[in-house]
Image (cartoon, rainbow, N blue to C red):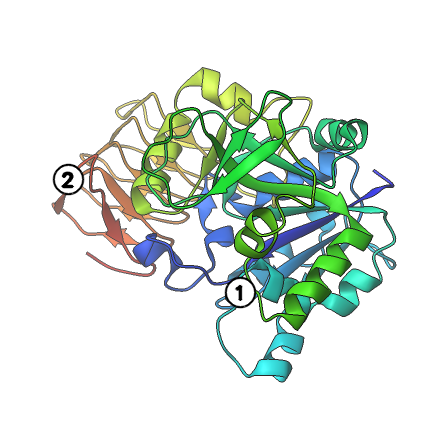
Amino acid sequence: MKGLHGIIFSYEKHNDLRELTANRMPASVPFAGRYRIVDFILSSMVNAGITDAGVVLQGNYQSLLDHLGSGKDWDMSRKHGGLRLLPPFAAEQAGGARELRGKMEALAGVRSYLQEIRQSHVVLADSDLIINIPIQDVYQAHLASGADITAVCTSNVASDCDVTFFRLDGTGRVSETLFPLRDRTGCHRSLEIYILSKQLLLDLVDDCLSHDQVSFRGAVLQAKAKELHIQGYVWDGYAAQIRSLKEYHDRSLELLDPAIRREVFPPQRPVHTKERNDASTYVDPAGACCNCLVADGCTIEGTVENSILFRGVSVARGAEVKNCILMQDTTVSRDAVIHHVITDKNVMIMDSRTLMGHDKYPMVIAKDTKV
């Protein structure tokens, strides 16, 4: 899309993903067997025809750098434009190495990049969102409404974490931005996707920088609600913000429902990811695999039910796996029994071990661990 540029925020934020983010950003947490969380919003941008996008980084971003690379797997590897990774060098030089406090501070740190954007409008999005949304439709609605900012939101207000909420008037305009909020009746939950013009974005960055304001929600959505026309775009398709371990567990296992899989992976808007060439999965005739999402390269000789297996997972004869999420190259040895367990990459469950989590509090095994 010639008129739209993508900005994805992937910097250190408070979350409850525990061991899953010990060595990586939430954006690069593996999801759905072969993807990373960032793949979904980045693919939505690519499917909308966006050719240029920047990813604002800070924190443990090495894993994300390795995953995104040059952007080739998303067809965004170009000499001019394409995918740009934006480490926080400018912010660190200006204020010392410290955690970014909000979107406006993050944008101020890459202001020179914003100045060089070739497109007239920018879409801002968080990287911890599982969604497959036609961004081109949001952009057209933004232009048709004449709004200064279009905010994508959903009428599904359920969330385990503190998020931003909007009240919309009869025309769909945002009348209030609320945070935190106990009584969510009549509200819409923000999905942290916003479209605005490049010039307005630069003006807002300069204004917030000069007043030492760092929060997009506080300094823009709340403080400038009367002077800016902020329009809501209600998206009631599938959307999940992954900000806690329970959300990760529940949203992952939701994918075992074919109806939800069709929403997340519609054929007209494919989700792209970094390629890895694996052999086909092998299921032993003596084994069993029921209601599972299984990636390439797995070997299943035991029993696996209601689980998600990433590439290269091995389940030995006699092992029992139920309601689990096993990431890349996990090994479950003979006669092991694991229920409601999330394993990070390269975990080995030894012979005859029994690990029992709960659907309300799943057990997590850190990367490269032997149990």
Foreground pick, 160 / 321: 160
Tag 2 and tag 1, C-beta contact below 8 Å:
no
Residue at (80%, 32%) from the top-left corner? Answer: 143
The answer to whether residue 73 of the structure is visible from this angle is yes
Distance CA(mark 2)–CA(mark 1): 37 Å
- Find numbered disc 1 in the image and state the secondary structure of the residue it sits on: loop
Foreground pick, 315 / 210: 210
- Image position of 319 with respect to 126: above or below: above
Which mark's residue is nearer the viewer, 2 or 1? 1
Q: Amino acid at mark 2?
A: Asp
- Identify the disc placed on residue 133: none
Residue picked out by circle 1: 61
Residue at (42%, 48%) from the top-left corner? Answer: 328
Report x, y in % for residue 264.
54, 27
- Judged from this view, the residue extending furthest toward the top is 259
Report x, y in % for residue 315.
29, 39
Report x, y in % for residue 86.
67, 65
Q: Quadrant of residue 49?
A: top right
